[in-house]
Image: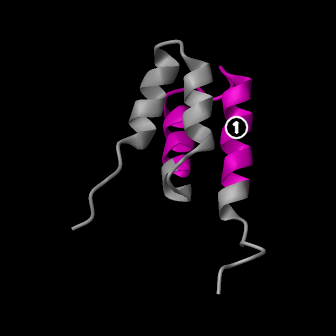
Amino acid sequence: MARTSDWANKVLALLKGGNSRAAIEQIKVAPSVKDLKALQAALIVGGLKGRWPTVDVAVADNLDALSAPRLHRAP
């Protein structure tokens, strides 16, 4: 059975604690697209989307970066 990741909840806690800079740094090193989508969903459900525009941009940019196919792969 797969464990669910608490990463999104931890980043959300950073945001609610007023540390958006640390949250953005965590978003930049997000473990997976699934975790970023969970964070994005939590922001929407919690009514927090738009409260931190830089966080919204960071989530969108990193979703694009992680979702894009890799141009170069190791053999």
How many other residues sit within 10 Å of disc 1, few (<14), some (14-19) or many (≥20)?
A: some
Looking at the image, the residue that sits furthest to the left is 1
Check if residue 15 falls in the magenta segment. Answer: no
Q: Position of residue 54 (x, y in %)?
A: 73, 27
Is 7 situated above or below 10? below
Q: Position of residue 57 (x, y in %)?
A: 74, 36
Left or right, 68 with respect to 32, comes to right
Q: Position of residue 22 (x, y in %)?
A: 56, 24
Which residue lies at the image location 21% right of the left edge and 68% below the top edge?
A: 1
Left or right, 65 with respect to 18, comes to right
Is 11 situated above or below 15? below
Looking at the image, the residue that sits furthest to the front is 75
- The residue under label 1 is 58
Mark 1: secondary structure: helix
Which residue lies at the image location 50% right of the left edge and 52% below the top edge?
A: 31
Q: How many marks?
A: 1
Q: What range of the chain is rendered magenta?
A: 36-64
Looking at the image, the residue that sits furthest to the top is 18
Which residue lies at the image location 73% right of the left edge and 66% below the top edge?
A: 68
- Determine the image quadrant of residue 51: top right
Left or right, 66 with respect to 5, comes to right
- Determine the image quadrant of residue 43: top right
Which residue lies at the image location 54% right of the left edge and 36% below the top edge?
A: 26
Q: Position of residue 46 (x, y in %)?
A: 49, 28
Q: Amino acid at mark 1?
A: Ala
Looking at the image, the residue that sits furthest to the bottom is 75
Image coloring type: one colour
Depth check, front residue: 70 or 33? 70
The C terminus sits in image quarter: bottom right
Left or right, 37 with respect to 75, comes to left
Is 19 situated above or below 61? above
Q: Main secondary structure of the magenta part?
A: helix
